[in-house]
Amino acid sequence: MTSGLLRTFGKDGFVAVDDLSLSVDPGQVHALLGPNGAGKTTTVRMCATLLAPTAGQIRVDGIDAVRRPEAARARLGLVLGGELGVYPRASARDNLLFFADLQGLDQRRRQQAVDTVLERMGLADVATRKAGAFSRGMLQRLHLARALLGSPPLLLLDEPTTGLDPDVAPQVRDMIRELAMDGTGVLLTSHSMPEVEELADTISVIGAGRIVIRGTVSDVAAYAGIGMTSGFSLPARHADAAVRLQECLGEGAVVVQRPVSSRWTVTVYWAANDSHADRQARDTVLATALAEIGTETPVDLVTRPASLEEAYLALADRLRR
């Protein structure tokens, strides 16, 4: 999809995106993850032909998007989180008919295309209602409906669940998953680590405009130096538990302790190259260390693979400009 992508801004030539290459296969959700200012939205806007790259190539469904932006634009759908993006005084159907005209759908296809996306996004029953009366979740579904006009093979979703209520965001995630299952390629940016972990087949972590690691959650965790984590709680009297456990466990783990209500929550981050190969071995080592500091193994002890959020937080310092 992109190769050697470069984008600079201003007279000083600030490098927002630097030698960035990525691909999105049909039916794949490829997540672009990174801090604010890392270059995620700039990348999406270049892929959407809204912003010309300084250098590099972009291909959408085989079309050179730099030389033929209009042709490429017809093969993709775009959703930018937080935008209004529709005419509030027009109905959902009239909005979509207008955007279908902009995309060049002929008169015969436009009505069928609009009916199809309204039904698919669960908006058929409110198609005649003005978009300005829609809830945030309904508006986001309308954005997705607009992006799906013409059945594009590629969707670019920049923070698609930003600002949505907790009960609405899962609905949008379900729709994204269904679209991918139907063969649509999806390039997704999000600040929600659980969302990315749930949806993405491939994760590219970007820092200072460059891809620093690409792969699965376990690949990102390994790059961050984390293998597994153990979590449990201790009574209030164990205020020095983290320090004492760290002394027992040594360099193979990092122990973090936080107050929660009247207890302590303790998390042990095991190094990716830790010699204790499995969950049971780590639990045994931890139980021995807990016994040394004078406490029994907590009943709520859970050892599991590191989450994407834990791995990302461990990487945070390396991603800053």
Image (spheres, rainbow, N blue to C red):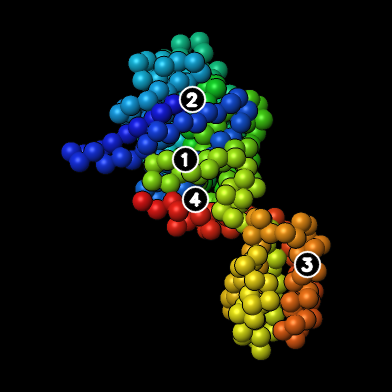
Q: State whether residue 131 appears in this view.
A: no
Mark 4 vs mark 3: which is more N-terminal? 4
In this image, 301 relative to 36: left or right? right
Q: Amino acid at mark 4?
A: His
Q: Which element is circle 4 on?
A: loop
Q: Which residue is pictured at 55% across the width and 28% down the height?
A: 24
Q: Quickly name the residue at label 3.
A: 283
Q: Quickly name the residue at label 2.
A: 1
Mark 1 vs mark 2: which is more N-terminal? 2
Residue placed furthest toward the bottom: 237
The percent coordinates of residue 195 (x first, y second) are 58, 48
Label 4, label 1: how far apart the Cα atoms are: 16 Å
Mark 2 vs mark 3: which is more N-terminal? 2
Badge 4 local density, few (<14 within 10 Å), some, or many (20+)?
A: some
Label 2, label 4: how far apart the Cα atoms are: 23 Å
Q: Which element is circle 1 on?
A: strand
In this image, 127 relative to 288: left or right? left
Of tags 2 and 4, which is closer to the observer? 2
Mark 3 vs mark 1: which is more N-terminal? 1
The percent coordinates of residue 266 (x first, y second) are 65, 73
